[in-house]
Amino acid sequence: MLTCYAPDLAPNQTTYLLSEDESKHAVRVLRLGAGTAIELLDGRGGRYAATIAEANPKRCRLHLTAHEQVPPRPYFAHVAVAPTKNLDRMEWFVEKAVEIGVERLSFLRCARSERRELKLERLEKIAVSALKQSGQAWLPQLDEMQDYAAFVQALPSPAHTYVAHLADDERTALAALAGNGPGGCVLIGPEGDFTPAEIALARAAGVRPVTLGHSRLRTETAALAAVFTMRLGR
C-alpha cells in the first residue's frame, strides 16, 4: 500500500488533496486509480486510511475513511552529532535513525568539525522519505547546527545526557545507562573525536561519559549505534 506524507492533515477532515509531487507519484508513476487504498501519515502521530476519490496527477483527491492517533513513545531518544564533511554519510545516518525510531536529531559545530555549516532542507526530505518507508508515525525534530558549547550549556537534563568519546577516561557502557529515566541524549563528536576541553566541559555540566563498545566507529556509525542502543528493547 502506498504511504504518503500529509503534514497539514487535521483529524476531522473527510477529504484531502495530495501535494503535486505525491499526486504525480501516485497517479502517473504507480498508475493508481479511483478506489485504491492509501495510507497517510502526518508526522505528529496521526495515521489515516484513505481511498482515491479522484485520480488527478496534479491534485489527487482522497476520501478519508479512518484515523488512528499513535501516542508518543515513552522513551525519548535524542542524538546530537557533529556532521561529517561528506554529507552523504549524514543522509545515510538520518535515514536509518528515522527507520529505527528517534525523536530528535541535533547537529553540533565542534572544534575539530570539518563541516561548519549545514542546510536542513535535504535532511528533512530524507527524514520524510524514511518515515513513509518505515511506517513510523512520528517525524523527528531536526535542529539547526549550533556550537557545541552553547548546546551543552543549554541542556535541560544533563543527568540523562551522555558524551561518547575515545579518550583514556573512565566511561560506562551506554547500554547500561540508556534505559534509566524517560529518555536520553547522546553526544557524538566529529572525526578525530571531541577535544579534551570539550569532554571536560560536558563533564562539568553533569554529562556522563560513555562508550559504545570496543571498536573505533565512524561518526555516522557511532550516531546510529547510539540510536539503536537507546531504542533496543523499547
Image (tube, rainbow, N blue to C red):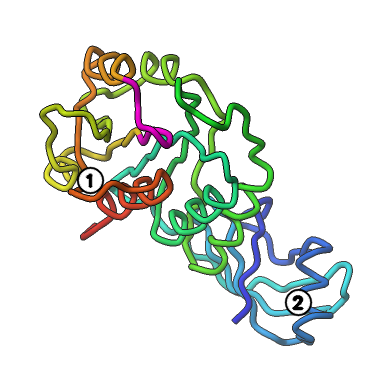
- Foreground residue, 217 or 74? 217
Where on the picture, by quarter, is residue 168? top left
For the point 34% across and 33% down, the residue is 187
In the image, which is nearer the foreground, mark 2 or mark 1? 1
SS category of the residue bearing label 2: helix
Range drawn in magenta = 188-195
Residue beneath disc 1: 212
The percent position of residue 135, horizontal first and vertical second, equals 49, 67
Residue beneath disc 2: 26
Where on the picture, by quarter, is residue 86? top right
Q: CA distance from mark 2 to mark 1?
A: 42 Å
Callout 1, which amino acid? Leu
For the point 24% across and 58% down, the residue is 232
SS category of the residue bearing label 1: loop
Relative to 233, residue 153 above or below: above
Identify the mark at residue 31; answer none if there is no mark. none
- Foreground residue, 197 or 2? 197
